[in-house]
Image (tube, rainbow, N blue to C red):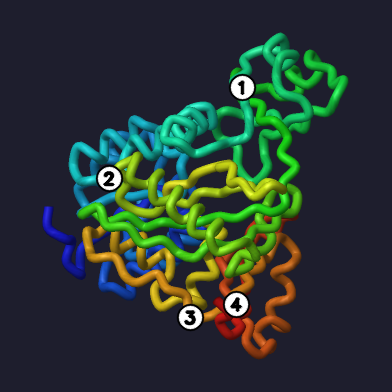
Amino acid sequence: MSPIPPGGAIGIFGGGQLGRMTALAAARLGYRCHIFCPEAESPAVEVSAAATIADYADRAALDAFGASIDVATFEFENVPHDAVARVAASVPVRPGWEALRTSQDRAVEKRFLNRIGLETSSWVEVRSAEDLKRAPCPGILKTARLGYDGKGQFRLDRDFDAGAVWSAFGAERGIVEAFVDFSTEVSAIAARGKDGSIAVFDVGRNIHRDGILRRTTVPAPVPASLAAEAQALTARAAEALDLVGLLAVEFFVTRDGRLLANEIAPRPHNSGHWTQDACGTDQFEQFVRAVAGLPLADPARHSDAEMVNLLGDDVHAWPELLAEPGANLHLYGKRDVRPGRKMGHVTRLSPKTR
């Protein structure tokens, strides 16, 4: 298939801030974006050429959506299979169902990572309180599906009550990961084009608060060899998925200097927002380039960067941030301020050190 020329339409499943920033990047390249999501008041809808507000099970809406676009992608993983398959009958869906399927289920994801040679913490799949009794402890119990930003997670300490925890958990299936005493967390983001070419952004260090990313610093304060290994492992995972688009991989760095893969996300990633200000081409433009079949751009970084998420009431500091020299403010247009909700981010640059 030839690259989609400027003026073409890119369909995006999901209306959140990742879709919003993707749509803005697509517009810079001359593309129109059509958002498909259930919520009319969504960050991506506000900046896109068209929107279909419908349930992901609405077949008629999906058919009309597919007929109006040249290619489809998504800004979050939990798009139902039937919706993807129905639109895929009309246009290419990138990165495709295999990447979606793998990232939607933590057990499938862990098996995939281990199969391609990425080390993870020890883990088991659990379906009952009896399974919990045999799980690694101390550990973290996570839902197999639909958890994000720390949701659907329970810490298991020694002598925990398996029956009470399982009852409170409420899901039919989950995984337990052994607790990792890590020194830091890092992530890498790889773009993979339709021709198989790969471009990987520099590795960032991530700091979380209450399970939500708070801060990413680039370059990550880890040895150059470890950063290069994280980039290579991320590229390996993108190739193994035959992915066309973006893939983010989060890693724990153990105290003895090993990388343990934690999670993957086949889409733009919060830990890559720094690229909007510190790179000639950011993660969102690379995403659009890959999905549209265009050549990938140079992911090189021209500055060091620190990106801070504005969570909940943090957004009320926008006047001070706008007045701060060197602060690059990005707001998502969300009106409802709630604790922990991602309202925007700010990136501060400094001269490149390495």
Q: Which of marks 3 and 1 precedes in the sequence?
A: 1
* Spatial separation of the CA atoms under disc 2 and disc 4: 32 Å
What's the CA distance linking mark 1 and mark 3? 42 Å
Give the CA separation, mark 1 to mark 4: 41 Å
Would you name the residue on which mark 3 appears?
302
The alpha-carbon separation of the residues under discs 2 and 1 comes to: 32 Å
The image shows residue 114, relative to residue 222, as above or below, that is: above
- Decide: few, some or many residues near mark 3? Use Cα within 10 Å; few <14, some 14-19, many ≥20: some
**Which quadrant, please, contains the C terminus?**
bottom right
- Residues at circles 3 and 2 in contact by the CB criterion of under 8 Å: no
Hey, what amino acid is under mark 3? His
| Front in this rendered view, residue 74 or 109 | 109
Q: Position of residue 105 (x, y in %)?
A: 50, 31
Residue found 48% across the figure and 73% down from its top = 276
According to the image, label 4 marks what residue?
329
Q: What label does residue 124 carry, if any?
A: 1
The disc labelled 2 sits on which kind of residue?
A: Val
Q: Could you tell me which residue is drawn at 60 percent across and 55 percent down?
A: 186
- Judge whether 323 appears above or below 180 on screen: below
Which one is closest to the eye, mark 3 or mark 4?
3
Q: State which quadrant residue 164 falls in.
A: top right
Per the image, the residue denoted by label 2 is 93
Characterize the local packing of mark 2: few (<14), some (14-19) or many (20 or more) Cα atoms within 10 angstroms. many
